[in-house]
Image: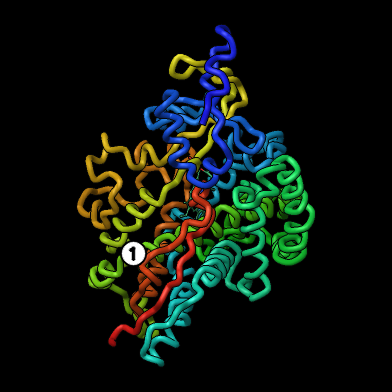
Amino acid sequence: IRVLHRRSSQSSNLPPLVAIPDEQLFGNPRHAYETALKQYGKIIGVPRKNRLEYIVDQSFVAEVLTNDKVYSFEHGTLSMLNLHVLLALPRSFMHEIDRVVQDHIVSDLDDSVDRIAPVFDKLAKKLAAPVSSECQPIAVEIDSEVHRMMAEAMLTLILGRHYASAAHIASTERIAVAIATLTGIFENMSWWSRTFPTVGRTWNWLKVMFIAIPYHFVLGIGWQAFSELSAITDVARSDIRKEPVIMSFARKFIDKKTHRISLIDRIWILSVILGLIFASVHQTAVVIMWVVCELAKRPEYIQEFRTDTFTETSEDGAQRLTYASLQNAERLDSFIREVMRTKGDTLSTVRQTVSDTALAGYVIPKGSFVIPLATLANEDENHYGENAKVFVGDRWVGTGKPATMVSPNYFPFGLGRWACPGRGLAVAEIKLFILSLIAHANLSLENGEYRVVDPLNVTSVAPKGRIFLHPLFS
Ligand code: HEM
Protein backbone atom coordinates (compact mmCIF):
# COMPACT_ATOMS: atom_id res chain seq x y z
CA ILE A 1 0.00 0.00 0.00
CA ARG A 2 1.45 3.37 -0.88
CA VAL A 3 0.29 6.97 -1.00
CA LEU A 4 0.13 8.32 -4.52
CA HIS A 5 -0.10 11.88 -3.29
CA ARG A 6 -1.00 13.51 -0.03
CA ARG A 7 -2.57 16.59 -1.44
CA SER A 8 -2.53 17.44 -5.09
CA SER A 9 -2.29 21.15 -4.25
CA GLN A 10 -3.08 23.41 -1.34
CA SER A 11 -6.15 24.83 -3.06
CA SER A 12 -7.76 21.53 -4.11
CA ASN A 13 -7.22 20.03 -0.64
CA LEU A 14 -8.06 16.47 -1.64
CA PRO A 15 -7.85 13.54 0.79
CA PRO A 16 -4.74 11.32 0.46
CA LEU A 17 -4.84 9.15 -2.61
CA VAL A 18 -3.76 5.62 -1.70
CA ALA A 19 -2.84 2.86 -4.16
CA ILE A 20 -3.66 -0.62 -2.93
CA PRO A 21 -2.31 -3.51 -5.04
CA ASP A 22 -5.03 -5.64 -6.67
CA GLU A 23 -4.07 -8.85 -4.83
CA GLN A 24 -4.66 -7.09 -1.50
CA LEU A 25 -7.75 -5.20 -2.63
CA PHE A 26 -9.52 -8.27 -3.97
CA GLY A 27 -7.89 -10.94 -1.80
CA ASN A 28 -8.14 -9.35 1.64
CA PRO A 29 -10.00 -6.06 1.16
CA ARG A 30 -10.96 -5.67 4.76
CA HIS A 31 -7.37 -5.76 5.99
CA ALA A 32 -6.15 -3.61 3.08
CA TYR A 33 -8.70 -0.80 3.55
CA GLU A 34 -8.52 -0.90 7.37
CA THR A 35 -4.72 -0.67 7.28
CA ALA A 36 -4.81 2.19 4.78
CA LEU A 37 -7.34 4.13 6.86
CA LYS A 38 -5.28 3.58 10.00
CA GLN A 39 -2.16 4.79 8.23
CA TYR A 40 -3.44 7.75 6.25
CA GLY A 41 -6.45 9.14 8.11
CA LYS A 42 -10.23 8.87 8.34
CA ILE A 43 -10.81 9.45 4.65
CA ILE A 44 -8.78 8.21 1.72
CA GLY A 45 -9.17 8.06 -2.04
CA VAL A 46 -8.57 4.57 -3.44
CA PRO A 47 -8.60 3.74 -7.16
CA ARG A 48 -10.45 0.52 -7.94
CA LYS A 49 -11.26 -0.80 -11.40
CA ASN A 50 -10.62 2.57 -13.11
CA ARG A 51 -12.72 4.49 -10.62
CA LEU A 52 -11.65 6.65 -7.72
CA GLU A 53 -13.62 5.91 -4.55
CA TYR A 54 -13.40 7.85 -1.29
CA ILE A 55 -13.46 5.44 1.62
CA VAL A 56 -14.39 6.79 5.05
CA ASP A 57 -14.10 5.25 8.50
CA GLN A 58 -16.86 4.67 11.07
CA SER A 59 -16.89 8.27 12.32
CA PHE A 60 -18.49 9.48 9.06
CA VAL A 61 -21.11 6.76 8.51
CA ALA A 62 -24.07 8.84 9.73
CA GLU A 63 -23.02 11.99 7.84
CA VAL A 64 -22.37 10.22 4.53
CA LEU A 65 -25.34 7.84 4.55
CA THR A 66 -28.00 10.19 5.90
CA ASN A 67 -27.17 13.65 4.53
CA ASP A 68 -28.88 12.97 1.22
CA LYS A 69 -28.76 16.61 0.10
CA VAL A 70 -25.01 16.36 -0.38
CA TYR A 71 -24.36 12.60 -0.58
CA SER A 72 -26.96 11.31 -3.02
CA PHE A 73 -28.18 7.72 -2.79
CA GLU A 74 -29.87 7.83 -6.19
CA HIS A 75 -26.82 9.21 -8.01
CA GLY A 76 -24.46 6.86 -6.18
CA THR A 77 -26.46 3.68 -6.67
CA LEU A 78 -27.56 4.29 -10.25
CA SER A 79 -24.05 5.36 -11.30
CA MET A 80 -22.53 2.25 -9.71
CA LEU A 81 -25.02 0.20 -11.74
CA ASN A 82 -24.13 2.15 -14.89
CA LEU A 83 -27.77 3.20 -15.05
CA HIS A 84 -27.20 7.00 -14.89
CA VAL A 85 -29.66 7.32 -17.73
CA LEU A 86 -32.51 6.74 -15.25
CA LEU A 87 -31.56 9.99 -13.48
CA ALA A 88 -32.61 11.95 -16.56
CA LEU A 89 -36.20 10.63 -16.50
CA PRO A 90 -38.98 13.03 -15.49
CA ARG A 91 -40.08 10.55 -12.77
CA SER A 92 -37.84 9.18 -10.03
CA PHE A 93 -37.33 5.47 -10.56
CA MET A 94 -36.01 4.92 -7.03
CA HIS A 95 -38.89 6.80 -5.39
CA GLU A 96 -41.36 4.68 -7.31
CA ILE A 97 -39.80 1.34 -6.32
CA ASP A 98 -39.58 2.56 -2.77
CA ARG A 99 -43.31 3.40 -2.75
CA VAL A 100 -44.30 0.01 -4.23
CA VAL A 101 -42.39 -1.80 -1.50
CA GLN A 102 -43.76 0.44 1.27
CA ASP A 103 -47.38 0.60 0.09
CA HIS A 104 -47.91 -2.83 -1.44
CA ILE A 105 -45.54 -5.23 0.32
CA VAL A 106 -44.45 -4.20 3.79
CA SER A 107 -47.65 -2.33 4.69
CA ASP A 108 -49.28 -5.74 5.20
CA LEU A 109 -46.55 -8.24 6.01
CA ASP A 110 -49.12 -10.68 7.46
CA ASP A 111 -50.64 -11.00 4.01
CA SER A 112 -47.29 -10.99 2.15
CA VAL A 113 -45.97 -13.80 4.38
CA ASP A 114 -49.17 -15.83 3.94
CA ARG A 115 -48.77 -15.68 0.18
CA ILE A 116 -45.17 -16.82 0.04
CA ALA A 117 -44.85 -19.19 3.04
CA PRO A 118 -45.94 -22.29 1.05
CA VAL A 119 -43.00 -21.79 -1.34
CA PHE A 120 -40.50 -22.00 1.55
CA ASP A 121 -42.27 -24.94 3.14
CA LYS A 122 -42.25 -26.79 -0.20
CA LEU A 123 -38.48 -26.50 -0.60
CA ALA A 124 -37.76 -27.46 3.02
CA LYS A 125 -39.86 -30.62 2.62
CA LYS A 126 -38.22 -31.46 -0.70
CA LEU A 127 -34.69 -31.08 0.70
CA ALA A 128 -35.47 -33.06 3.84
CA ALA A 129 -37.46 -35.88 2.21
CA PRO A 130 -34.47 -38.16 1.38
CA VAL A 131 -33.00 -37.56 4.85
CA SER A 132 -36.16 -38.72 6.63
CA SER A 133 -36.57 -41.80 4.44
CA GLU A 134 -32.94 -42.94 4.51
CA CYS A 135 -32.36 -42.01 8.17
CA GLN A 136 -28.79 -40.84 7.57
CA PRO A 137 -27.11 -37.47 6.88
CA ILE A 138 -27.21 -36.35 3.26
CA ALA A 139 -25.27 -33.55 1.53
CA VAL A 140 -27.59 -31.10 -0.21
CA GLU A 141 -26.98 -28.67 -3.07
CA ILE A 142 -28.86 -25.89 -1.36
CA ASP A 143 -27.55 -22.72 -3.04
CA SER A 144 -29.26 -23.07 -6.43
CA GLU A 145 -32.45 -24.34 -4.76
CA VAL A 146 -32.58 -21.26 -2.52
CA HIS A 147 -32.17 -18.95 -5.53
CA ARG A 148 -34.98 -20.74 -7.30
CA MET A 149 -37.17 -20.57 -4.20
CA MET A 150 -36.62 -16.82 -3.90
CA ALA A 151 -37.48 -16.33 -7.56
CA GLU A 152 -40.70 -18.31 -7.10
CA ALA A 153 -41.63 -16.47 -3.88
CA MET A 154 -41.18 -13.02 -5.39
CA LEU A 155 -42.96 -13.95 -8.64
CA THR A 156 -45.88 -15.21 -6.58
CA LEU A 157 -46.00 -12.07 -4.47
CA ILE A 158 -45.31 -9.45 -7.14
CA LEU A 159 -47.03 -10.91 -10.20
CA GLY A 160 -49.30 -13.65 -8.86
CA ARG A 161 -49.30 -17.39 -8.38
CA HIS A 162 -50.06 -17.99 -12.07
CA TYR A 163 -46.57 -16.66 -12.95
CA ALA A 164 -44.75 -19.27 -10.88
CA SER A 165 -44.08 -21.71 -13.76
CA ALA A 166 -40.70 -23.44 -14.11
CA ALA A 167 -39.85 -21.30 -17.16
CA HIS A 168 -40.72 -17.99 -15.49
CA ILE A 169 -38.86 -18.98 -12.32
CA ALA A 170 -35.73 -19.79 -14.33
CA SER A 171 -36.00 -16.47 -16.22
CA THR A 172 -36.45 -14.53 -12.97
CA GLU A 173 -33.34 -16.09 -11.46
CA ARG A 174 -31.35 -15.20 -14.56
CA ILE A 175 -32.62 -11.61 -14.63
CA ALA A 176 -31.78 -11.08 -10.96
CA VAL A 177 -28.25 -12.42 -11.44
CA ALA A 178 -27.78 -10.57 -14.74
CA ILE A 179 -28.70 -7.20 -13.23
CA ALA A 180 -26.54 -7.96 -10.20
CA THR A 181 -23.55 -8.30 -12.55
CA LEU A 182 -24.01 -4.60 -13.34
CA THR A 183 -22.87 -3.83 -9.81
CA GLY A 184 -19.67 -5.61 -10.70
CA ILE A 185 -20.21 -8.64 -8.50
CA PHE A 186 -18.41 -10.97 -10.84
CA GLU A 187 -15.76 -8.42 -11.84
CA ASN A 188 -13.90 -8.99 -8.59
CA MET A 189 -13.47 -12.64 -9.38
CA SER A 190 -12.44 -12.40 -13.01
CA TRP A 191 -8.94 -11.42 -14.06
CA TRP A 192 -10.28 -10.11 -17.37
CA SER A 193 -12.79 -7.69 -15.76
CA ARG A 194 -10.31 -6.56 -13.12
CA THR A 195 -7.66 -5.81 -15.71
CA PHE A 196 -9.92 -4.15 -18.29
CA PRO A 197 -12.74 -2.80 -16.14
CA THR A 198 -14.20 -0.36 -18.66
CA VAL A 199 -14.43 -2.99 -21.39
CA GLY A 200 -15.83 -5.47 -18.86
CA ARG A 201 -18.46 -3.01 -17.63
CA THR A 202 -19.54 -2.04 -21.14
CA TRP A 203 -19.76 -5.69 -22.16
CA ASN A 204 -21.87 -6.53 -19.09
CA TRP A 205 -24.13 -3.58 -19.70
CA LEU A 206 -24.73 -4.54 -23.33
CA LYS A 207 -25.38 -8.16 -22.38
CA VAL A 208 -27.94 -7.20 -19.74
CA MET A 209 -29.74 -4.55 -21.80
CA PHE A 210 -29.78 -6.34 -25.14
CA ILE A 211 -29.82 -10.01 -24.23
CA ALA A 212 -30.84 -10.78 -20.64
CA ILE A 213 -33.69 -8.29 -20.20
CA PRO A 214 -35.27 -8.69 -23.67
CA TYR A 215 -34.87 -12.47 -23.70
CA HIS A 216 -35.60 -13.38 -20.09
CA PHE A 217 -38.06 -10.64 -19.19
CA VAL A 218 -39.67 -8.87 -22.13
CA LEU A 219 -40.50 -11.95 -24.21
CA GLY A 220 -41.95 -13.97 -21.33
CA ILE A 221 -43.01 -12.47 -18.03
CA GLY A 222 -43.00 -8.93 -19.41
CA TRP A 223 -45.28 -9.71 -22.33
CA GLN A 224 -47.78 -11.62 -20.16
CA ALA A 225 -47.84 -8.80 -17.59
CA PHE A 226 -48.16 -6.19 -20.35
CA SER A 227 -51.27 -7.97 -21.68
CA GLU A 228 -52.79 -8.11 -18.20
CA LEU A 229 -52.08 -4.42 -17.65
CA SER A 230 -53.71 -3.65 -21.00
CA ALA A 231 -56.88 -5.40 -19.87
CA ILE A 232 -57.11 -3.83 -16.41
CA THR A 233 -60.12 -1.57 -15.85
CA ASP A 234 -61.14 0.74 -13.05
CA VAL A 235 -64.08 -1.40 -12.01
CA ALA A 236 -64.12 -1.18 -8.22
CA ARG A 237 -62.88 -4.34 -6.50
CA SER A 238 -63.70 -5.31 -2.97
CA ASP A 239 -60.63 -7.53 -2.59
CA ILE A 240 -57.85 -5.26 -3.88
CA ARG A 241 -55.58 -6.33 -1.02
CA LYS A 242 -55.67 -9.87 -2.38
CA GLU A 243 -54.33 -8.81 -5.77
CA PRO A 244 -50.69 -9.37 -6.73
CA VAL A 245 -48.48 -6.34 -6.06
CA ILE A 246 -48.32 -5.35 -9.74
CA MET A 247 -52.09 -5.03 -10.02
CA SER A 248 -52.70 -3.01 -6.87
CA PHE A 249 -49.75 -0.76 -7.84
CA ALA A 250 -51.06 -0.39 -11.41
CA ARG A 251 -54.46 0.91 -10.30
CA LYS A 252 -53.11 4.38 -9.57
CA PHE A 253 -52.18 4.72 -13.27
CA ILE A 254 -55.70 4.10 -14.62
CA ASP A 255 -56.74 7.18 -16.56
CA LYS A 256 -60.03 8.63 -15.27
CA LYS A 257 -61.27 9.40 -18.78
CA THR A 258 -60.17 6.36 -20.79
CA HIS A 259 -60.42 3.92 -17.84
CA ARG A 260 -57.20 2.35 -19.12
CA ILE A 261 -53.46 2.56 -18.43
CA SER A 262 -51.50 4.45 -21.08
CA LEU A 263 -48.72 2.72 -23.05
CA ILE A 264 -46.03 4.82 -21.37
CA ASP A 265 -47.38 3.96 -17.94
CA ARG A 266 -47.53 0.25 -18.75
CA ILE A 267 -43.86 0.33 -19.76
CA TRP A 268 -43.06 2.32 -16.62
CA ILE A 269 -44.87 -0.20 -14.40
CA LEU A 270 -42.97 -3.09 -15.99
CA SER A 271 -39.63 -1.30 -15.53
CA VAL A 272 -40.39 -0.71 -11.87
CA ILE A 273 -41.39 -4.36 -11.43
CA LEU A 274 -38.13 -5.42 -13.08
CA GLY A 275 -36.21 -3.23 -10.62
CA LEU A 276 -38.16 -4.75 -7.76
CA ILE A 277 -37.35 -8.29 -8.88
CA PHE A 278 -33.69 -7.36 -8.95
CA ALA A 279 -33.78 -5.74 -5.50
CA SER A 280 -35.65 -8.60 -3.87
CA VAL A 281 -34.46 -11.94 -5.27
CA HIS A 282 -30.68 -12.25 -5.54
CA GLN A 283 -29.54 -10.45 -2.40
CA THR A 284 -32.05 -12.19 -0.13
CA ALA A 285 -31.02 -15.59 -1.54
CA VAL A 286 -27.38 -14.77 -0.80
CA VAL A 287 -28.10 -13.70 2.79
CA ILE A 288 -30.18 -16.85 3.34
CA MET A 289 -27.06 -18.81 2.34
CA TRP A 290 -24.98 -16.84 4.86
CA VAL A 291 -27.43 -17.68 7.63
CA VAL A 292 -27.64 -21.35 6.57
CA CYS A 293 -23.81 -21.66 6.55
CA GLU A 294 -23.42 -19.93 9.93
CA LEU A 295 -26.15 -22.07 11.47
CA ALA A 296 -24.72 -25.27 10.00
CA LYS A 297 -21.39 -24.22 11.55
CA ARG A 298 -23.11 -23.70 14.93
CA PRO A 299 -25.85 -26.35 15.07
CA GLU A 300 -26.08 -25.97 18.86
CA TYR A 301 -28.44 -23.01 18.28
CA ILE A 302 -30.98 -25.04 16.29
CA GLN A 303 -32.87 -26.61 19.17
CA GLU A 304 -33.60 -23.29 20.85
CA PHE A 305 -34.93 -21.85 17.60
CA ARG A 306 -37.30 -24.82 17.42
CA THR A 307 -38.44 -24.27 20.98
CA ASP A 308 -39.32 -20.65 20.16
CA THR A 309 -41.41 -21.61 17.15
CA PHE A 310 -45.17 -21.64 17.27
CA THR A 311 -47.38 -22.36 14.29
CA GLU A 312 -51.04 -21.69 13.54
CA THR A 313 -53.56 -24.21 12.32
CA SER A 314 -54.85 -23.44 8.85
CA GLU A 315 -58.34 -24.23 7.52
CA ASP A 316 -57.24 -27.64 6.22
CA GLY A 317 -55.88 -28.56 9.67
CA ALA A 318 -52.19 -28.24 8.67
CA GLN A 319 -49.71 -26.31 10.83
CA ARG A 320 -48.32 -23.19 9.19
CA LEU A 321 -45.91 -20.36 9.93
CA THR A 322 -47.44 -16.89 9.96
CA TYR A 323 -45.93 -13.44 10.33
CA ALA A 324 -46.79 -13.67 14.05
CA SER A 325 -44.73 -16.90 14.30
CA LEU A 326 -41.79 -15.12 12.71
CA GLN A 327 -42.03 -12.11 15.01
CA ASN A 328 -42.02 -14.48 17.97
CA ALA A 329 -38.74 -16.09 16.87
CA GLU A 330 -36.56 -13.67 18.86
CA ARG A 331 -33.47 -15.87 19.21
CA LEU A 332 -33.41 -16.60 15.49
CA ASP A 333 -33.83 -12.87 14.83
CA SER A 334 -30.81 -12.16 17.06
CA PHE A 335 -28.80 -14.83 15.24
CA ILE A 336 -29.67 -13.27 11.87
CA ARG A 337 -28.69 -9.81 13.10
CA GLU A 338 -25.37 -11.19 14.30
CA VAL A 339 -24.72 -12.93 10.95
CA MET A 340 -25.46 -9.68 9.12
CA ARG A 341 -23.25 -7.66 11.46
CA THR A 342 -20.22 -9.97 11.29
CA LYS A 343 -20.30 -11.45 7.79
CA GLY A 344 -17.68 -8.93 6.71
CA ASP A 345 -19.47 -6.33 4.54
CA THR A 346 -16.86 -3.93 3.22
CA LEU A 347 -18.13 -1.51 0.55
CA SER A 348 -21.85 -2.24 0.73
CA THR A 349 -23.48 1.19 0.60
CA VAL A 350 -22.51 4.01 -1.72
CA ARG A 351 -23.30 7.70 -2.11
CA GLN A 352 -22.22 10.28 -4.71
CA THR A 353 -21.47 13.91 -3.91
CA VAL A 354 -23.77 16.34 -5.72
CA SER A 355 -21.43 19.30 -5.11
CA ASP A 356 -17.87 19.89 -3.87
CA THR A 357 -18.21 18.79 -0.26
CA ALA A 358 -16.15 19.56 2.82
CA LEU A 359 -15.39 16.56 5.01
CA ALA A 360 -12.77 16.22 7.75
CA GLY A 361 -10.86 19.26 6.55
CA TYR A 362 -10.73 18.03 2.93
CA VAL A 363 -12.84 18.81 -0.09
CA ILE A 364 -14.41 15.89 -1.94
CA PRO A 365 -15.08 16.91 -5.53
CA LYS A 366 -18.61 16.86 -6.97
CA GLY A 367 -19.55 13.52 -8.54
CA SER A 368 -17.28 11.40 -6.30
CA PHE A 369 -18.26 8.03 -4.88
CA VAL A 370 -18.09 8.06 -1.07
CA ILE A 371 -18.27 4.71 0.72
CA PRO A 372 -18.07 3.92 4.43
CA LEU A 373 -15.98 0.85 5.27
CA ALA A 374 -18.69 -1.25 6.92
CA THR A 375 -16.48 -3.66 8.89
CA LEU A 376 -15.01 -0.80 10.91
CA ALA A 377 -18.47 0.30 12.04
CA ASN A 378 -20.15 -3.10 12.36
CA GLU A 379 -17.33 -4.43 14.56
CA ASP A 380 -16.28 -1.25 16.33
CA GLU A 381 -14.85 -2.06 19.78
CA ASN A 382 -15.66 1.42 21.08
CA HIS A 383 -19.29 0.70 20.39
CA TYR A 384 -19.67 -3.05 21.01
CA GLY A 385 -16.94 -3.58 23.60
CA GLU A 386 -14.08 -6.06 23.67
CA ASN A 387 -16.00 -8.92 22.08
CA ALA A 388 -17.05 -6.79 19.08
CA LYS A 389 -15.48 -9.22 16.63
CA VAL A 390 -16.85 -12.35 18.27
CA PHE A 391 -20.00 -14.02 16.93
CA VAL A 392 -22.54 -14.16 19.77
CA GLY A 393 -25.77 -15.58 18.41
CA ASP A 394 -28.00 -14.38 21.24
CA ARG A 395 -26.28 -10.99 21.65
CA TRP A 396 -29.49 -9.15 20.71
CA VAL A 397 -32.07 -11.14 22.68
CA GLY A 398 -34.03 -8.81 24.97
CA THR A 399 -32.27 -5.66 23.68
CA GLY A 400 -35.19 -4.42 21.56
CA LYS A 401 -32.91 -4.37 18.51
CA PRO A 402 -34.33 -6.60 15.80
CA ALA A 403 -32.35 -7.61 12.71
CA THR A 404 -34.16 -4.92 10.72
CA MET A 405 -33.17 -2.01 13.00
CA VAL A 406 -30.31 -0.11 11.37
CA SER A 407 -27.87 2.33 12.97
CA PRO A 408 -24.45 3.85 12.15
CA ASN A 409 -22.91 0.71 13.73
CA TYR A 410 -25.14 -1.76 11.93
CA PHE A 411 -26.09 -1.00 8.34
CA PRO A 412 -26.30 -4.17 6.22
CA PHE A 413 -29.60 -2.70 4.99
CA GLY A 414 -28.17 0.81 4.54
CA LEU A 415 -29.10 3.84 6.60
CA GLY A 416 -31.24 6.97 6.44
CA ARG A 417 -34.00 7.93 4.03
CA TRP A 418 -32.94 5.20 1.59
CA ALA A 419 -32.38 2.32 3.98
CA CYS A 420 -33.75 -0.85 2.40
CA PRO A 421 -37.57 -0.61 2.45
CA GLY A 422 -37.84 -4.39 1.95
CA ARG A 423 -35.86 -5.40 5.02
CA GLY A 424 -38.96 -6.46 6.99
CA LEU A 425 -39.83 -8.88 4.21
CA ALA A 426 -36.20 -9.99 3.74
CA VAL A 427 -35.78 -10.97 7.40
CA ALA A 428 -39.21 -12.64 7.39
CA GLU A 429 -38.10 -14.70 4.38
CA ILE A 430 -34.84 -15.74 6.00
CA LYS A 431 -36.78 -16.87 9.08
CA LEU A 432 -39.39 -18.66 6.97
CA PHE A 433 -36.73 -20.73 5.28
CA ILE A 434 -34.71 -21.54 8.41
CA LEU A 435 -37.76 -22.45 10.51
CA SER A 436 -39.26 -24.52 7.68
CA LEU A 437 -35.97 -26.39 7.23
CA ILE A 438 -35.22 -27.10 10.88
CA ALA A 439 -38.76 -28.40 11.33
CA HIS A 440 -37.65 -31.36 9.21
CA ALA A 441 -33.89 -31.77 9.70
CA ASN A 442 -30.75 -30.81 11.59
CA LEU A 443 -27.85 -29.11 9.81
CA SER A 444 -24.10 -29.46 9.76
CA LEU A 445 -21.23 -28.20 7.63
CA GLU A 446 -18.48 -30.37 6.17
CA ASN A 447 -15.31 -29.81 8.25
CA GLY A 448 -17.21 -27.12 10.17
CA GLU A 449 -16.12 -24.41 7.72
CA TYR A 450 -17.36 -22.54 4.68
CA ARG A 451 -15.40 -20.51 2.15
CA VAL A 452 -15.89 -16.80 1.43
CA VAL A 453 -15.92 -16.63 -2.36
CA ASP A 454 -15.58 -12.88 -2.88
CA PRO A 455 -14.45 -11.04 0.26
CA LEU A 456 -15.07 -7.67 -1.42
CA ASN A 457 -18.68 -8.47 -2.12
CA VAL A 458 -20.06 -10.67 0.62
CA THR A 459 -23.60 -9.30 0.28
CA SER A 460 -23.99 -10.29 -3.35
CA VAL A 461 -21.90 -13.45 -3.57
CA ALA A 462 -22.91 -16.39 -1.36
CA PRO A 463 -20.32 -18.31 0.68
CA LYS A 464 -19.62 -21.89 -0.36
CA GLY A 465 -19.81 -24.83 2.00
CA ARG A 466 -21.00 -28.41 1.87
CA ILE A 467 -24.22 -28.55 3.89
CA PHE A 468 -25.45 -31.82 5.39
CA LEU A 469 -29.00 -32.44 6.52
CA HIS A 470 -29.47 -34.92 9.36
CA PRO A 471 -32.63 -36.78 10.31
CA LEU A 472 -34.36 -35.28 13.34
CA PHE A 473 -34.41 -38.51 15.31
CA SER A 474 -31.22 -40.46 14.79
C1 HEM B 1 -31.29 -9.69 2.93
C2 HEM B 1 -31.74 -9.09 1.85
C3 HEM B 1 -31.52 -7.64 1.52
C4 HEM B 1 -30.43 -6.85 1.79
C5 HEM B 1 -29.13 -7.24 2.50
C6 HEM B 1 -30.75 -5.54 1.27
C7 HEM B 1 -29.88 -4.45 1.38
C8 HEM B 1 -30.14 -3.22 0.82
C9 HEM B 1 -29.23 -2.11 0.87
C10 HEM B 1 -27.85 -2.11 1.53
C11 HEM B 1 -29.82 -1.08 0.21
C12 HEM B 1 -29.22 0.32 0.01
C13 HEM B 1 -29.56 1.19 1.20
C14 HEM B 1 -28.68 2.39 1.36
O1 HEM B 1 -27.81 2.62 0.53
O2 HEM B 1 -28.84 3.11 2.37
C15 HEM B 1 -31.10 -1.55 -0.27
C16 HEM B 1 -31.99 -0.79 -1.00
C17 HEM B 1 -33.18 -1.26 -1.48
N1 HEM B 1 -33.77 -2.47 -1.22
FE1 HEM B 1 -32.94 -3.97 -0.17
N2 HEM B 1 -31.98 -5.55 0.71
C18 HEM B 1 -32.50 -6.82 0.85
C19 HEM B 1 -33.75 -7.26 0.44
C20 HEM B 1 -34.70 -6.48 -0.20
C21 HEM B 1 -36.04 -6.90 -0.54
C22 HEM B 1 -36.63 -8.28 -0.22
C23 HEM B 1 -36.64 -5.86 -1.18
C24 HEM B 1 -38.04 -5.74 -1.75
C25 HEM B 1 -39.07 -6.37 -1.32
C26 HEM B 1 -35.67 -4.77 -1.24
C27 HEM B 1 -35.91 -3.55 -1.82
C28 HEM B 1 -34.98 -2.53 -1.85
C29 HEM B 1 -35.20 -1.28 -2.57
C30 HEM B 1 -36.42 -0.93 -3.41
C31 HEM B 1 -34.07 -0.48 -2.33
C32 HEM B 1 -33.78 0.91 -2.90
C33 HEM B 1 -33.84 1.94 -1.80
C34 HEM B 1 -35.21 2.45 -1.48
O3 HEM B 1 -36.13 2.23 -2.27
O4 HEM B 1 -35.38 3.09 -0.39
N3 HEM B 1 -34.52 -5.18 -0.62
N4 HEM B 1 -31.28 -2.86 0.12
Q: Residue furthest left?
A: 398
Q: Is residue 325 above or below residue 87?
A: below
Work out whether residue 82 or residue 280 is closer to the camera in this orientation and state it: 82
Residue 311 drawn at (x, y percent): 31, 74
Residue 350 drawn at (x, y percent): 53, 37
Residue that appears at 45% across and 71% down: 466
Q: Is residue 402 above or below residue 165?
A: above
Residue 412 drawn at (x, y percent): 43, 46
Residue that appears at 64% across and 33% down: 51
Residue 218 drawn at (x, y percent): 75, 60
Q: Is residue 149 above or below residue 126?
A: above
Disc 1 marks a residue whose amino acid type is: Leu
Under 8 Å from ligand 1: the CB of mark 1?
Answer: no
Report if residue 232 is visible in the image. yes
Quadrant of res 199: top right
- Left or right, residue 440 beside residue 383: right
Q: How many marks?
A: 1
- Left or right, residue 371 beside residue 386: right
Residue that appears at 64% across and 75% down: 165
Q: Residue furthest bottom?
A: 133
**Which residue carries the number 1 mark?**
326
- Left or right, residue 221 beside residue 416: right
Q: Secondary structure at mark 1?
A: helix
Report if residue 272 is visible in the image. no
Work out whether residue 377 or residue 67 is closer to the camera in this orientation and state it: 377
Q: Is residue 16 above or below residue 409?
A: above
Residue that appears at 38% across and 83% down: 137
Q: Residue furthest right?
A: 210
